[in-house]
Amino acid sequence: MDLATSSLLLGVFVLLLLAAGLWVALALTAVGLATIFLMVSAPPGAVMATTVWGAVNSWDLAALPMFIWMGEILFRTRLAEDMFTGLAPWMRHMPGRLLHVNILGCAIFAAVSGSSAATTATIGRMSLPELRRRGYDEKMAIGTLAGSGTLGLLIPPSIILIVYGAATEQSIARLFIAGVVPGVMLAFLFMGYTVIWSLLNRGRMPEPDPRVPYLQRLWQTRRLFPIIALIAGVIGSIYGGFASPTEAAVVGVVLSLALSGFTGTLNRASFVDALRQATRTSCMIVLILAGAAVLTVAMGYTGIPRELAAYIGSLELSPFALLAALTLFFAVLGCFLDGISIVVLTTSVILPMIEAAGLDIIWFGIYLVLVVEMSQITPPVGFNLFVLQGLTGHNILRVAQMTLPFFCLMIVAVGLIVAFPQLALWLPQTMLAR
C-alpha cells in the first residue's frame, strides 16, 4: 500500500470514529491498534502496554495536574473581581476604557491559570454584567473577552505548552519563556484594535465614569497585590532558576490555596470540587496523550511519517510556503478538534517536516500554540465560544461573528512571528545565555 493510500485510510478512519462520537483518546488508540494489527508484524498488546507507560511516565507531565488544580482553585476565588476593581480606575483615560480591563484581566489571569476556557469563564462572569450595566457595546465586550481568553494557551504557565514539550521532548521552561513576548504582543494587538475602534465609534461608547482621585486609585490597586505575588512566585521561580516547572506548579498550588484561604473562599466543598475537576481534566489530557502515543508508534512502524517528510522535502517548498500550508491545515483542523488533541495528533507527523525545513522546534511550538489559539474561537468546536454562549445566551454563530476581528488579529500575530522569529526566540536565548 503506497503512502497516499495509507495516509488517506488512516485519516478517514480517525474522522469516522470522531464523527461517531467516540472520545478522542479512544479513537486514536483504536486507529493505532488497528494499524499495528493490519500493517505491522509486532504484537499489538505488548506495543500498546509499553507505549502507554512510556507516554505517561514522564516527570515533566507532573506539572500538568498541578497547574490545572491551581487554575481550578483560583477559579473559585474572587480573584477576577479584585482584578477588575484594581485595573478599572487606571483605564478611564484610555480610548476604550473598561474594555481594556477584559484584555488585561485575561492576560493576568492567564499567567496563573494556564487554561483558555478557565480564563474566559472567570473574567467573563465578572466583566460582562458590569460592562453591560455601564452601557458598553456588547459586540466589543464579548469580542475582547473571547479573543483575550485565548491568551491562557500562550502566556505561561500554559497547559498546552506542557503537552507540546512532553510530546516533543523539549524544555518546558524554555517554552514558557518563549511564550512571554508573543503573548504580550498579542495582548497589545488586541488593545490597539480596541483603541482604534473606540476612536472611530465614539457614539457607541458610554459616558466616562466619574473621575477617581489619584490616591483612591492607588488604594484600589492594592487588590492586585495577591495575584502579582502569585505570578511572581510561580513564574519568577522558573525564570529565576529557583525551581523547575514541576516544582513551580507545586508552589502555585500552595500559594493559590493560601490566597483562597485569605479571601475566605476556601472550604471543604470548594477544595473537593476543585480537586475533583482538576482530576477529571488531567485524566482526560493524559488519556489523549496515551492514545496519541499509540498512534505515533504505529505510524512509526509503518514508516508513514518518514515517507511523508521525504515527500514534502521532495516538493522543495520554502519554509514560508510550508508554514502557510500548515496554518491552513491547523485552522481547518481546529474547527473539529480541541487544541490539545491537535497538538498530540499531529506532532509526530509534522515534526520531521519542521526539522527538515530547518525551523527551530521551540519557535514552532509557539507558532503552533498561536494557530491553535485561533481554533478556540472558530465554530463548531471553539471552546471559548461554548463558554461565552453559556455566559451570554447568544447562539454560537453569533458569538463567532463578534470575535471575527480578534481572529484576524491572531492571523496578524502568526504572520509577525513567522516574519520575525526572534519574537519567540530572543528571550529564551538571552535568559539561558546568562
Image (cartoon, rainbow, N blue to C red):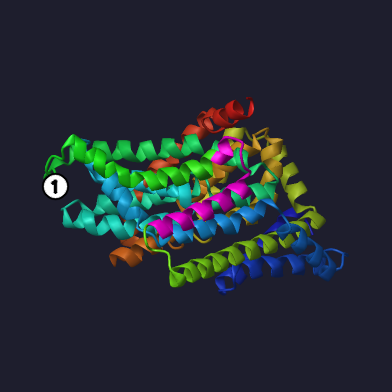
Tell me the chief SS of the magenta region.
Answer: helix
Residue 96 seen by the camera = no
Residue 215 versus residue 346: which sits nearer the camera? 215
Q: Is residue 117 left or right of residue 422?
A: left
- Image location (x, y in percent) of residue 267: 43, 68
Q: Is residue 235 left or right of residue 312?
A: left
The crowd level at tag 1 (other Cα within 10 Å; few <14, some 14-19, many 20+) is: some
Q: Quadrant of the C terminus?
A: top right
Location of residue 333 (image quadrant): bottom right
**Magenta extent:** 237-262
Residue 70 versus residue 427: which sits nearer the camera? 70
| Residue occupied by mark 1 | 206
Residue 282 versus residue 418: which sits nearer the camera? 282
Q: Is residue 33 above or below residue 176?
A: below
Q: Is residue 112 left or right of residue 86?
A: right
Residue at position x 58%, y 47% in the image: 248
Q: Is residue 226 above or below residue 20?
A: above
Location of residue 94 (image quadrant): top left
- Image location (x, y in percent) of residue 213: 16, 37
Q: What residue type is disc 1 on?
A: Pro
- Image location (x, y in percent) of residue 293: 72, 59
